[in-house]
Image: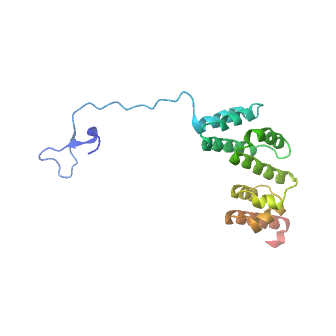
Amino acid sequence: MGIREHQTIRGQGDDPAGQAGQQLPGPVPPPVAPRPAPGRSGYAGHLDRLAAAAGTGAEAEAVAAVLGDPDPVMADSAVVTHLDRRAVRLPADGAFPRWASSLRPAVDGRAFPARRLREWTLLKTMEAGGAWSAAELTAASDWCQHTAALSPAPYEALAVLAASARTGRARNAAAQRLRRLALSKDPSAR
């Protein structure tokens, strides 16, 4: 059984434990080296194209082109990964609003990327001290609620999440942040 060059022949008087043996005769084919792809394709290729366009005037067009891929799940996933990577690095009160506005038309009509951009907008709005609503935060995805609980969200947002986030993970993270905030404001509460 197995590949011919891995099989051994036992002769008479060979070691009963099977330690000795010889390989079957025959040429061993050379190992097949993987062929390098001329350019990355699929998910990784989309991420490369989006990263190359990041911060340029062509970023929205690159997002739209990726979303035109015949595999919508892969395309949505690549765009959401790009949104996450870019949004986390942009300041809430400066470049983020302009960037989000420029990408909104490209992701409209695609549920997952459009929702992620809306949720990043909510997170950045809270971080910058802008207007947000408890209803919007409690209606957000589990990802958004957990990210808000770990981000520089205001005390009021943490209180909403500690009381009514959908997952225990987000509720606990928000409650821990509230306790740390209380300890940092009142050292005697330790």
* In the image, farthest residue toward the left: 12
Colour theme? rainbow
Q: Is residue 61 above or below residue 116?
A: above
Q: Residue furthest top?
A: 38
| Left or right: 38 in relation to 83 | left
Front-most of 189 and 160? Answer: 160
Extreme residue toward the bottom, this view: 189
Q: Position of residue 185 (x, y in %)?
A: 85, 65
Residue 101 in which image quadrant: top right
| Residue at (83% x, 43% y) in the render | 97
User: What residue occupies the far front of the structure in this picture?
Assistant: 109
Is 67 displayed left or right of 27 in the figure? right
| Residue drawn 76% across the image and 34% down it | 55
Q: Is residue 131 left or right of residue 17?
A: right
Q: Quadrant of residue 66?
A: top right
Q: Quadrant of the N terminus?
A: top left
Q: Quadrant of the C terminus?
A: bottom right
Up-down: is 144 above or below 68? below
Give the residue at x 74% y 57%: 140
Residue 109: x, y in percent?
Answer: 72, 43
Identity of the residue drawn at 81% across and 44% down = 91
Percent position (x, y) of residue 88? 74, 46
* Residue 24 picture location, percent across and down: 22, 37
Location of residue 181 with respect to 48 vertically, above or below: below
